[in-house]
Image (cartoon, helix red, strand yellow):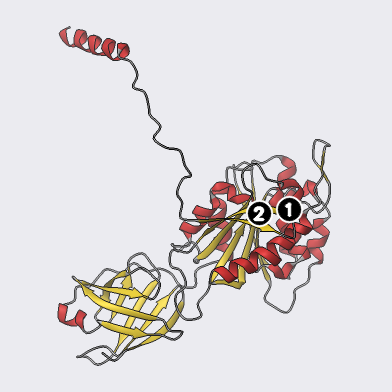
Amino acid sequence: MRVLIVAFLLAALAQAAPAAELKVVSIGVAQTAAERLVVHSERVGRDFQIDVWSPVTRPWLPGQKAAAVYILDGGYGMAGPIASTLGGTNAMQPAYVVTVGYPPGKGAREFDLLFGPGTRPDGTVAKGGGAEAFTAFLVEELKPFIEARYPADPGNAVLMGHSLAGIYTANVLTRRPDAFAGYVIASPSLWADPQVIERLAAVRRGAGPPRRVFVAYGGAEAPYMIDGGRRVARVVAANRSFESRSQVFASEEHLTYYPALARAGLGALLPRKTRIDFPDPVALTPEVLGRYAGTYRFSEERTMTVTVEGAKLRATRTDRPPMSLSASAPDRFFADGMDIRLVFEGPATGPASAVTMQMNGDAARGVRAAP
């Protein structure tokens, strides 16, 4: 009984105590790993908000470039960080992830994504008409800008769009198929442009490799959206000019599968060149580790300085943060959780003469500089 009375009194006191006032210290923009740019398009005559996520392992080897993914609708605020994170795993290759959106209150989504008017299922008309200029901005202004600012591979770029952006992506595939190497077409709003089916069937392969295409939709979407996704998937699969895959996200609605879209679509179109292995580290003596200390010169004025740090090596590259390396064998080292491997060359005793650095499926050799 005494315990019950004490509990009752404590509860009463808690209810009687005034609630603490929460003080707002400051209000600002949340920090992300992306670089945010607001750019002005001369072709469209408006500003766009561009967020760029760099790969976890950014290109560093001489001549090395990374894939680039252009995601429309700003990636709904989620596809950018998701795809960027996946690029540091075995799910997909590292890529510059570029989300294309609008500054707050300055969007013109429907106008930019449709090449002409379209009739909605409820009979109302979507005006559209700005997609030609928007495509010119995307292909002729933004893409070259990104490729000049970052080491992004022009021949390994992917365009990803969902819903209205999905039908837009399908249209870019028909109108300018060589603009991108891959296309993720998700829940395409076929109601806005039914004629795109005929245009997809008519696309013919150019001189280069086939365009890679991934089509997706949710199994619990509105029937007209399922029909549109199914028809686009079928015509793409039937056209041998494309290298295609499709996926139905069972029991998922129009937006609920979107967080998984990057994993499925980009993983299919941008598979890793080599897997990231997770070997068990091997302990080496300070004498063995000391053999690898020194500066190694690669081409294009790139250097890497290796020092001993406890039981590991520390590699400092030109214009890159230092990285810690663990041994997997007496002459082989790896960066934890990253697709970076170093293989040293040289005599069984004495300093190493060279090192081969393997990174994101590419490799380059650096020669030890004279002391």
Is residue 315 visible to us here?
yes
Q: Which quarter of the figure is the C terminus placed in?
A: bottom left
Answer above or below: position of 321 versus 265: below
Q: Which residue is mark 1?
A: 167
The front one of 55 and 348 is: 55
Q: Secondary structure at mark 2?
A: strand
Q: Position of residue 18 (x, y in %)?
A: 33, 15
Q: Secondary structure at mark 1?
A: helix
The front one of 236 and 69 is: 69
Q: Which quarter of the figure is the N terminus placed in?
A: top left
Q: Position of residue 252 (x, y in %)?
A: 59, 43
The front one of 139 and 20 is: 20
Q: Which residue lies at the image location 24% right of the left edge and 77% below the top edge?
A: 307
Q: Which residue lies at the image location 42% right of the left edge and 37% below the top edge?
A: 26
Q: Which residue is mark 2?
A: 161
N-term-proximal mark, 1 vs 2? 2
Q: Amino acid at mark 2?
A: Gly
Q: Quadrant of residue 9?
A: top left
